Amino acid sequence: MANTGTILLERYELGRLLGQGTFAKVYYGRSIRTGQSVAIKVIDKEKVLRVGLVNQVKREISVMRLVRHPNIVHLYEVMATKSKIYFVMEYVKGGELFNKVARGRLKEDVARKYFQQLINAVDFCHSRGVYHRDLKPENLLLDEDENLKISDFGLSALAESKRQDGLLHTTCGTPAYVAPEVINRKGYDGAKADIWSCGVILYVLLAGYLPFHDSNLMEMYRKIGKSEFKCPSWFPPEVRRLLVRMLDPNPHTRISIAKIKESSWSKRGIASKSVKADTERKDLASACTESAAGSSENKQNVATLSNLNAFDIISLSAGFDLSRLFEDSPLKKEARFTSCKPASVIISKLEDVAKRLNLKVSKRDAGLLRFEGSKEGRKGILSIDTEIFEVTPAFYLVEVKKSNGDTLEYQKILNEGLRPGLQDIVWAWQLEPPPQQSEQQLDEQSNSQLQQQQHSDNLQQLSEQEQQQLLCPPQLLQQEQLP
């Protein structure tokens, strides 16, 4: 199986062995369809069943699908045969951060960059109710651009794993990086335990060695319990203060991630990046505005709307969406609604609602609008694309899709802002049945359709079956594009 050139399920070519553990091996792989490099984790089903780790494997899959972030290794898909389970993941070319630290301590600016990326990713995990519980340099990978990626969620826990006392109770992790409350086995807050591990990692990055180390394991646990460590002379005062708060043996008084982000040492260098990103966004918005200039905006957009044919309509039908076979997350990154209002009215309404929500609006061709948030979120600036499709001259489909940023932030804007604000132009959202119409409304609609038929013999009307395909509640979520 490890031989070069082995084809896996007619989708991937398996290459060299990258690493291995007790129950799994990781190989370099390549997508046959796209040529993209991937890492393929091969888990032996028999071994997993024999030691009772089935639930752990299932949890790892669920967790990795929840935590999609630039600084977390991406899980593309999961496949299985009778004897093996395959995790197809992002290939992170640079290897482990541990190998870099093993050659000596890092420069302060380099350590700060990795620490900022680590804290951002851990904060994102916690916002999704995920606690890693085994953070250490061996589980932090570096890509070809020297960006950090958290890997190995095998020991992670979900918020639902907490007992009635609101705490986690499974003792796990690597001794040198584990928090004292985990060692004491009296229950612990997963977020606070992860913060302790991040503190140990920060120390290791700047010192080149561990803060708590002893050949006698019990003596090392004693040092951890009392937080007995010394900072080297080259540690800046700001780092010393931050470490004292992160490595506080009392989890109740230990610093939070929000406070870590506000610390002067952690924030250094972020302001200049934000200014640069803001400049780039302004340049992009300016370019979009210039490309749309030169003619009446709404008329131009309406004139170039994309049309949906019968095959497009069928493809949107819930019965043809197979993605729930692959995705468990209820958080969708797109929504659709239909409208009987003129396209110009739809565009104007979208712009009006976006501005009321303090979203920047930029127009593009073919009925495409882009909304952008004004503040940086957990995964960058929120960006939403809306596209209008003409089904018939009197019936339109509008797609609202997240193109950048955090999915939870997108869902909040969609449900609390866009949906209420657009209700007077929406006939039905895809997740909801169409509204009941009064007899008077039906008569008016019938008269309108007769007038349209008299105006053009070639006018195409949606059949009732096609409308139902567009609007019936989807039974499955959309599958992510795989490599």
Image (cartoon, helix red, strand yellow):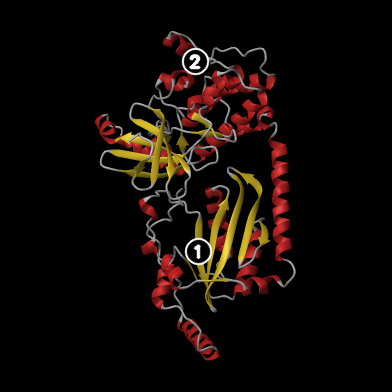
Residue 224 badge: 2
- At label 1, which amino acid type do we have? Arg
At 55% across and 35% down in the image, what residue appears? 143
Q: How many marks?
A: 2
Residue drawn at (35%, 34%), measured in percent from left and top? Answer: 2
Residue 298 in the image, given as x and y percentages of width and height: 67, 72
Q: Residues within 10 Å of mark 1 (few under 14, many from 20)?
A: some
- Asked if residue 356 shows in the view, the reply is yes
Q: Is residue 7 above or below residue 204?
A: below
First in residue order: circle 1 vs circle 2: 2
The x and y percentages for residue 324 are 37, 53
Q: Residue at x 51, y 37 (%)?
A: 72
Which structural element holds mark 1?
Answer: strand
Residue that lies at the very extreme toward the bottom in this rendered image:
454
State the residue position of label 1.
Answer: 336
Q: Which mark is residue 123?
A: none
Q: CA distance from mark 1 to mark 2?
A: 53 Å
Q: Foreground: 184 or 143?
A: 143
Q: Amino acid at mark 2?
A: Ile
When asked about the image quadrant of residue 303, the answer is bottom right
Locate residue 293, reporting x and y percent: 73, 66
Question: In the structure shown, which secondary structural element does the residue marked by tag 2 occupy?
Answer: helix
Other-residue count near label 2 (Cα within 10 Å), few / some / many at <14 / 14–19 / ≥20: many
Q: Position of residue 473 (x, y in %)?
A: 40, 63
